[in-house]
Image (tube, rainbow, N blue to C red):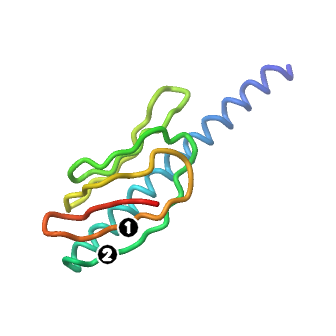
């Protein structure tokens, strides 16, 4: 009786942790997009520094035109947490768990993003 309950509990905790990491990655993507749109609205050469904390389970990230994308590993495969932007986004994002500082710089074509 105890073994089946432990298996169910473990599955619930794993799914819950994965869900929290996914939601957090979505919030980080939204923060990046909101910050980039604000910097762009101020015009060139405006810039801002944004602190982000990438959750565990993140295995890849990308900026593609107007999209911020984080890939997370889950028990069901890869999940994509993303956010669309109204401005063009270029540059690079961190690809694994941790605290990072992003620098967002407005230019004529959108916002350039780099990190430390």
Task: Note whether 52 is above or below 5 in the view shown.
Answer: below
Identify the residue at the far left of this view. 108
Residue 50 placement (x, y as % from top left):
44, 69
Question: Residue 8: which quarter of the image?
Answer: top right
Density class for disc 1 (Cα within 10 Å; few <14, some 14-19, many ≥20) is: some
Residue 9 placement (x, y as % from top left):
74, 32
Q: Residue at x 43, y 35 (%)?
A: 79
Image mark count: 2
Element class at badge 2: strand
Q: CA distance from mark 2 to mark 1?
A: 7 Å
Q: Please indicate whether residue 96 sits to the left or right of residue 84 in the image.
A: right
Tag 1 or tag 2, which sits nearer the N-term?
A: 2
Q: Residue at x 52, y 52 (%)?
A: 54
Q: Please indicate whether residue 94 sits to the left or right of residue 14 in the image.
A: left
Foreground: 9 or 22? Answer: 22
- Give the position of the N terminus as an image quadrant: top right
Report which residue position mark 1 lands on. 103
Density class for disc 2 (Cα within 10 Å; few <14, some 14-19, many ≥20) is: many
CB atoms of marks 2 and 1 within 8 Å: yes
Element class at badge 1: strand
Report which residue position mark 2 lands on. 47
Residue 46 placement (x, y as % from top left):
27, 78
Task: Note whether 44 is above or below 56 in the view shown.
Answer: below
Identify the residue at the far right of this view. 2
Foreground: 62 or 3? Answer: 62
Q: Residue at x 55, y 48 (%)?
A: 97
| Disc marking residue 16 | none
Q: Please indicate whether residue 86 sits to the left or right of residue 29 in the image.
A: left
Foreground: 75 or 90? Answer: 90
């Amino acid at each position: 009786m105890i073994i089946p309950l432990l298996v169910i509990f473990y599955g619930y905790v794993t799914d819950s942790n994965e869900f929290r990491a996914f939601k957090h990655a979505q919030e980080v993507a939204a923060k990046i997009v909101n910050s980039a749109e604000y910097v762009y609205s101020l015009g060139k050469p405006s810039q801002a520094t944004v602190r982000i904390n990438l959750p565990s389970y993140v295995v890849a990230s990308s900026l593609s035109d107007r999209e911020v994308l984080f890939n997370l590993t889950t028990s069901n495969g890869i999940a994509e947490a993303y956010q669309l932007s109204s401005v063009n986004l270029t540059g690079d994002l961190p690809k694994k768990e941790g605290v990072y500082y992003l620098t967002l710089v407005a230019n004529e074509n959108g916002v350039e993003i780099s990190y430390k």
